[in-house]
Structures are given as C-alpha cells and as structure tokens.
Amino acid sequence: MFKALKRDPDDRADIEDGQRAATTASPRVPAPAAKAAGSPVILAFPAAPVAAEPAHPGLRAAIEAWCARVDLAPDLACDIGSRKWLRGLATMFGLGAAALALLPGFTAVEAAATMPLDTAQQGEFRSQSIAPLALGADTGRHMGATPLVSPLTGVPERPTLQLTSTLGQGDTLPRLLERAGLGSADVAQVTQLVSQVVPAGEIGSGTRFDITLGRRPAEGAARALDSLAFRARFDLDLSIERGAGGLMAVRHPIRIDETPLRIRGTVGSSLYRSARNAGAPVGAIQSYLRAVDKYLSLDGDVRAGDEFDMILAYKRSAKGEREVGDLLYAGVERGGKPKLQLMRWGSDGQMFAAGAIGQPRSVPIGQPVASARITSPYGARRHPILGYVRMHAGIDFGAPYGSPIYAVADGVVTFAGRHGGHGNYVRLQHSGGLGTGYGHMSRIAVGNGTRVRAGQVIGYVGSTGLSTGPHLHFEAYRGGRTINPAGIAVIQSPQIDGRERDAFKARLNALLGVTPGAALGSIEPVASDPVETTREIDKLAP
C-alpha cells in the first residue's frame, strides 16, 4: 500500500521549483492537479517491519561470535611463531587427527551382484577365477589336483612330434638336427644324403626345416626321424623320408623361368630417379651407374631426354618366389640410336662395350677413394712435417680413417708392405707402362703378385709414415718416373678374340630381343602339371 506524507514548506518550495522546470521543458504537458490545490502529496513505500532481536542470544549465536573474534584458521605463512600462528597450527593438527580417527577400515563390504546369477552361471564364473585352479573344482574344468587324485605310473608318449627348425647365421646342419632331437646315427645319415644333392655350405641361413619325429626305438633313446623337408635351392625342394630300406632323399624339382628382366625409360632431371620411377631395384641401378660411369660422364654425357636400358638376370618359380640377379646389359640411347652398349661377358663377369670388343681403347682411371677431397695437389710444396719445400710427387685425398681404397685400373701388385715415409704402401703395374702407388694405408688388403681388377679394394685409409692425419697419398709412374695422376688414362687391349666375338654378338642380340617387363608375368601351367580335382571337403569323407 502507498501512504501520503505531508512535507514542510521548504520541501514544498523544492517541489514547486522542480515542477516549474518540468513545465518549461514540456509546455504541452498539463500541470498536475496537486499544484492547483496548493498542497503537494508525496507517495512513499512503507518500511518493512524489523524483527526484534531476542533479549538473550542463544548458544549458537555465542559460538559464532566467539569464532569470529578468535580466528581459529589464520594464514600460517604469516606471523610464524606467534600465538595466533600456534593457534592455527593446533587447528590443523586437530582436524588431521579427527580425519584419521574417522577413517573407514579396509574390511570387505558385502554388496549385491550387478545381475542375478543362477547356479550354472555362478559355476562358470568360479571356473574362471584363480582359486579353483589351486583348490580344484567340480565344474568339469581342468583344475588343480586334490588329495584324491593319484599320479599315473606311466604316461603314454605321443607317437609323432612335428616341429620346425631354422638354420641360423653361422649354424650347421648337424647342429640343427641335434637340437631338434635326432640321434647321432640319423644326423650322420641325413647329412650324407643332403650333401649328395646340395653342398651343406650352399644352404643359406634362414632356411626352414620341417621335421617329423617318430617313436623312440627304446626307452631313453632319441626319437627316430620319420621325414625332413626343406628348400635346397631356388629350383629344388628336398625331403628325407623313411622307407622300408631306411632313410632316402627324394627330390621335388620346381619349375623355374629365367627370362631376363628388361627395364627401359627416359632420363629426366636425374638418371637415378628416372630408373627408380621405372621400377628398377636400387642395387641394379647402382651396378648400372658404375658400369656406365667408366665410359660416359654421368654429369655431362647423359642428358635429359636420353633413354636408359638395363637388363637383369631374373628368376621366378612356380611357387611364386622371384629372385633378381646381376646386371647383364647396360645401354644408353639418344635419338633412337645406341650411344653406349655394355654387356656382361666371361667367367669373371666384366662389362664389355659392344662397339669396341676387338679394339684396344683408352680408359680413364677411376678415383682411388670414394667421396674424398683433394687436400694437396701434385707439385712443389712445403712439407708439413719436414718444414722445407720439396716436390710432392702425387695427390693427397682426405678421407675418414678406414675408408676403402680402390684400384684405379686393372693391374698386378708389384709391392705391398712398409715403404719409408709412405708407411703402408701398395704399388700396381698397369698396361702401357703405367704404374700407380697408394701410401699411408692403415691396412693392406692385397699381397705381392696379386692380379687386381679396377674398383677392387686394395687397402684402407690411414695415417702411417710421415703423415699428419688420415689421408691417401696417390702417385702415378710412367717409365719409372712420377707423373701428375690427374687425368691419366690406361690402354686396355682387346680381351675378346675373334672366336668369341660371334658368341658375344649372338648373346647381345638375344638380350636386346627381350620385351621390357616380360619377366613380370606369372608362369603359365604346362600340360604335364598335375591338376588338383579333389575338393578339400571330399578329403574329410570316411
């Protein structure tokens, strides 16, 4: 409800001034009726009644007032050691003691199952627990033995035992058979039968042997071998089987297709990447680049737009295995015409250029150390150890300690050993009166009189003799005098005579007749292969 209140004259004057200002701001608003009457009325809300405080506060009010005055939980980081701080510390310990006193125990609490279980379900759960495995159970599961169980006097042995053993690195066939449990007589007989088919040293590590052992001939003796089967070669499965006359070897030939794998493509920004995009294996590409690099410069002579051609030895078996062999042919074509044709020929597997098989040719020497930098060229210099200027009769190649050193060309080792300031030193004699020397080796890998091929490792980088760090001192000789090794070449005489020339060309034409990608198809079955007509489900019929 509203209540009318009278104002004194001073308040009335203030009200009239406010009304006058309002009338001036809004002339069209009619004056209030209260002004005509001369006695303004003020409307006000009645104040809420205030509850009277009790005359005597209760226990609760007294406790609250005491707690507000005393401050039982002050900040323990302030006023350390004061009475206020000690009171707060006592409060903390008191609350902690109360929490420990009211701490619940760890006794088991019974609770209802999350779902109702009948007797069969309870037995199934009990069989999956740990206790029945030790105490036994009556659910039909395999449980621990109780005192009512008596051990058997004898356990019958399995009639056959099948296992698989793998030949490890550095392992031998007799040791593998002994680990499998064969007796010494069977081990000797199996080793003899296998060696008649394939030498034991040619069985590669990782070969798996499927072994079946039969009954023991006597109590305590080793089990007799019933059968053994493994992959003896890429084209042969071999099994040792026990027949009426004892153990015998049975060959199971595997049909093999040896069509070479030919890969062709166009050179783009990088010959290596172009060959990888064409599907060539990494090892084959490396062999191809090494062969071509001896005749063409990979940086200047091979251009974008040229075509590369490589043919690899390739085998595929009727079981689906595939095996990539050596590089057989390496070619480079430009404008549809062959720029370089190399083919592997001879017992040592060298690559020969088809255009110069009967002519001597000049071949630039290779680099003696891969990825090395020249630290000192040929010519006069101040010796880093002796301290005076003298002729440096070679080229120094800086390389990490132990890096392999290669023969730059075919030749014969005329010296291998300690050689004064050269330290460990090897000297090779090449054709055309050219010789090369290699000094400061950490280790020598060839001996006197050894015939080496270009690219063969003859030693390793070291720092023997008068040397300040690991490097190779490379020298070249002609007519017994040192010459600058940079840019020299050796003359190679033709190594294919007239009798082999026709065979070489026939082999080259046969390789060039291979269709690219023809070796990637599957082997078609021949008419002589047996056809499986019995269904697997029929084999289960009694």
Image: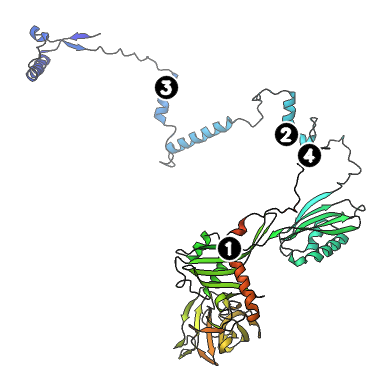
Question: Disc 1 designates what residue?
Answer: 262
Q: Give the label on residue 515, or none.
A: none
Question: Disc 2 designates what residue?
Answer: 128
Give the number of the mark in front: 4 or 2: 4
Give the number of the mark in front: 4 or 3: 4
Q: Amino acid at mark 2?
A: Gln
Disc 2 element: loop
Relative to 61, say whether 240 is above or below: below
In the rendered image, which quarter is residue 9 located in? top left
Mark toward the start of the polypeptide (4 vs 2): 2
Give the number of the mark in front: 3 or 1: 1
Q: Position of residue 518 (x, y in %)?
A: 60, 59
Q: CA distance from mark 3 to mark 1?
A: 105 Å
Q: Position of residue 106 (x, y in %)?
A: 64, 32
Q: Residues within 10 Å of mark 2 (few under 14, many from 20)?
A: few
Q: Please name the residue shown 73% across and 60% down the image.
A: 235
Q: CA distance from mark 1 to mark 4?
A: 45 Å
Give the number of the mark in front: 3 or 2: 2
Mark toward the start of the polypeptide (2 vs 1): 2
Mark toward the start of the polypeptide (4 vs 3): 3
Left or right of 350? Residue 153 is right
Q: Give the label on residue 62, or none.
A: 3
